[in-house]
Amino acid sequence: MAFIVKNDGFVCDYCGAVNPPGVGTCRNHCFKCLCSQHVDNTSPGDRASTCHGKMIPVSVLSGSRKSDYVLLHVCEKCGKEMKNRVLPDDDFEAILAISQKHIYG
Ligand SMILES: [Zn+2]
Ligand SMILES: [Zn+2]
């Protein structure tokens, strides 16, 4: 059981990290490796995708506010891109590592 979009914790399928429930929002990616799973089709939480591929964080985009950062995930199976808000307890080192590769915005 993983990647439940309800505001529950989950165990990451990819790195095994135990993710606590999101703070004030739905957690849909692992706080540690930042990977997600392709379960949503058009909007976050719709659970309409049957792909279930691994969503890899490829870049960090700055959001509308200075404090907002958005992870760009790409599905390694079908190539779909999804944007996910960075949560306050996401691993900052992991985000930095991605942002040093690519930063847009
Ligand atoms: Zn993980
Ligand atoms: Zn996919």
Image (cartoon, grey):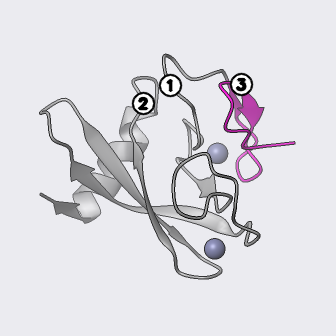
Residue 100, by quadrant, is bottom left
Q: Dot 1 corresponds to which residue?
A: 25
Identify the mark nearer the N-term, 2 or 3: 3
Instruction: From the viewer's side, name the closer residue of 34 and 50.
Output: 50
Q: Which percent across, then down, holds residue 82? A: 45, 62
Q: Is residue 15 magenta?
A: yes
Label 3 – label 1 distance at C-alpha: 10 Å
From the image, which quarter does the N terminus lie in? top right
Magenta highlight range = 1-19
Identify the mark nearer the N-term, 3 or 1: 3
Q: Dot 3 corresponds to which residue?
A: 8
Q: Dot 2 corresponds to which residue?
A: 87
Lateral position of residue 45 relative to residue 99, left or right: right
Residue at 24 percent across and 35 percent down: it is 68
Mark 2 neighbour class, 10 Å CA radius: few under 14, some 14 to 19, many 20 or more: many
Instruction: Please identify, in this view, whether the residue under mark 1 or under mark 2 is nearer the observer.
Output: 1
Q: Which percent across, then down, holds residue 86? A: 38, 38
Disc 2 element = loop
Instruction: From the viewer's side, name the closer residue of 70 and 16.
Output: 70
Lateral position of residue 37 relative to residue 26, left or right: right
Q: Is residue 68 above or below residue 51?
A: above
Residue at 65 percent across and 25 percent down: it is 7
Please report contact status of discs 1 and 2: CB closer than 8 Å, yes or no.
yes
Q: Which percent across, then down, holds residue 42? A: 53, 62
Lateral position of residue 94 relative to residue 47, left or right: left
Residue at 56 percent across and 31 percent down: it is 26
